Each structure stands twice: as structure tokens, then as C-alpha cells.
Amino acid sequence: MPLYGEMQIENSDGVEERFVQTFSGEVFVIGAGAMAEAFVKGVLEKRAITADRLVVTGRALGGRAAALGERYGVRVAGMEAAASARLVFLAVKPADVAEALAQVRPHLNGQPLVSFAAGVTMGWMAEIIEHRSPVVRTMPNIPVGVQEGVTAISFPEGGLEERDRRDILFLLEQLGEVVEIPERLMNAATAFSGSGPGFVCYFLEAMEQAAIRLGFDPLLARALLLQTVVGTARTLREWGLAPDELRRRVTSPGGTTQAGVAVMEDGRLREIVDAALQAAARRSEEMGQAYAVAGESAARE
């Protein structure tokens, strides 16, 4: 059976002579929360896989898992469905990883296990599943749901076939950028790109509230805010500029931008941002250590 097929795309006027590559294997997703939905939504919208080849499970087959089934047309099944999957994606909170792995362990037979969980190491997970499958660690961020995310990925040193590597990259690359890094940098990636959307939104919250205090209607403030962010990001990418270069271009001596930046510098914004990322990276490492203890007991059960 081929690993990839082709899907013909249709529009309202008929059939277009255009084909997209689709993954022909079955993908099993453990979890039904925000990241699981972002992954499901992203690969389906990009037509990287068909809904009938996506299987989702959760703590219960009702609730969020059932809602994903209804919303996206994917199958909902218990852990036993992992046995027939080509790839297994683990999309649960770090605190739930040990339990989820213990439940799926009897159904693993060599198919790669791809984890989205922050702070949880490949070695730790491999021990829990008794090395029944190679483990891949990733850290996607929430914009994967609109195909504009970034996913940091670490592959194991051995045990993963080249075709499996290609398959994993194929699916994740549909969702945005994929950056391969050594696992020792994964906590830093979790702090930077994984938590990054939250940090950016915190800053945007402050800008939006300040705009309203300046007299803008909330809806207008939101519209201006979003387009400013989207336009700035696109300018950086398309012009190939570093953030400091673009900032200098829009900062005239004695002008409005300089006045605002001076306030941020007085408030030591750079130091605050650095401290925030350091704290997030430490927390990622702490979570991994804490769940390793829980994992040892789960592995013995």
C-alpha cells in the first residue's frame, strides 16, 4: 500500500485539474484539547490527510473527542485503534502523559510515537512504553491550526526509519515551519516558540487596552492591532529584515516611536522579556523532572 496518494481538488464550478499529495496511512491522535484540534484542523484543511484516516481518542469517547468527530468528520475510537495506525501523535497535557502512555503501550508495535507534550523527554517516554516504538519529541505552537505555526522537532538517535522521518515531517510541514533541533534545546524552544504566542498576546492585550484608553472603540482598536501585527510580521519576512532593523527604520529622532521606545527601555522591557523566557524554559525542565517521577510508577504498573 503506498504511503502517499493524490486528492483531486474541486471548487464550486467543477473539478480543477490540480492534485495534492495526501498521506495514505492512518494517524491516531491521543487527546482532544486545543493542540490536538489545532493539529487535526491544520492537516485536514491543508488536505495532507483525509478525515477517514484520522482517529482521535480522549479520556472518554464522548465530550471533546466526540465534538472533534462531529466537527471534522474524523473517527473516534479507544486506545486499541492505535494498533493499526502508521503514526501515533500524543497531544495531551504533560501531567497526563504517563497515564496516556501506559494505556496505549499494549497497542504499540513499532509505529512512531510523536509527542507534543512540553518538558517530557524522549528517554522518559521510551521507558514508559517499554521501547515498543521510537519516540519523537516536538513542540508546536497554536498557530499550526491556521497553517502558520512553527514546530521544533527532535528525532531519536536511532530506531527510526527514514520513511517514518519523512512521513512525520510531511504532516508537520503542512502546518507551518518545522525546525529540527537537538533535544537539549527543546526546553528553550518550548519557552520561545511554544509559549511565544501567549507572550505576544499578553503584549497585544496591553496595546489594545492602551488604545481604548486613547479613545478608540474596542472593535476598531482590535482591527488596527491585528493588521499592525500581521503587516509587521510580513514586512520582516518579505524584506528579510531583523526586528531591530525595521524598528530603526520607523524610529525618527525625536519622533513618536522614539518617545514610546524610551518608556519601554526605562521600564527594562528587554530584561523582563529575557526573564520571562528563562522562567518558561526552567518550568519546562521542572515539569519534565516532576513527571519523570510519576512516569516511573506508571511504567511499573
Image: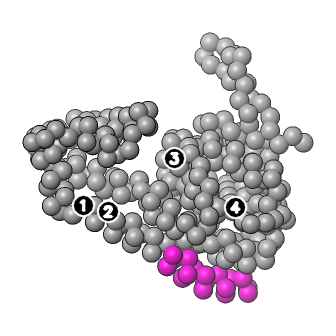
**Does label 1 or label 4 sit earlier along the sequence?**
4
Q: Say if mark 2 contacts mark 1, CB within 8 Å.
A: yes
Q: Tell me the quarter of the image containing the N terminus.
A: top right
| Secondary-structure class at tag 3 | strand
Magenta span includes 43: no
Secondary structure beneath dot 2 equals helix
Q: CA distance from mark 3 to mark 4?
A: 19 Å
Residue type pointed to by label 3: Gly
The stretch in magenta equals: 285-301
Closer to viewer: mark 3 or mark 1: 1
The residue that mark 3 highlights is: 149
* Numbered circle sitting on residue 273: 2
Dots 1, 4 in contact, CB < 8 A: no
Instruction: Please tell me in which quadrant of the rendered image residue 294 appears.
Output: bottom right
The local crowd at label 3, few if under 14, some if 14 to 19, many if 20 or more residues have their Cα within 10 Å, is many
> What amino acid is at disc 4?
Phe
- SS type, badge 1: helix
Left or right of 129: which side holds 254? left
Q: Disc 3 or disc 4, which is closer to the eye? A: 4
Identify the residue at image location x=60%, y=36%: 45
**On the image, numbered disc 1 is attached to which residue?**
269
Amino acid type of the residue that numbered disc 1 sits on in the rendered structure:
Leu
Could you say which disc has been placed on residue 155 in the image?
4
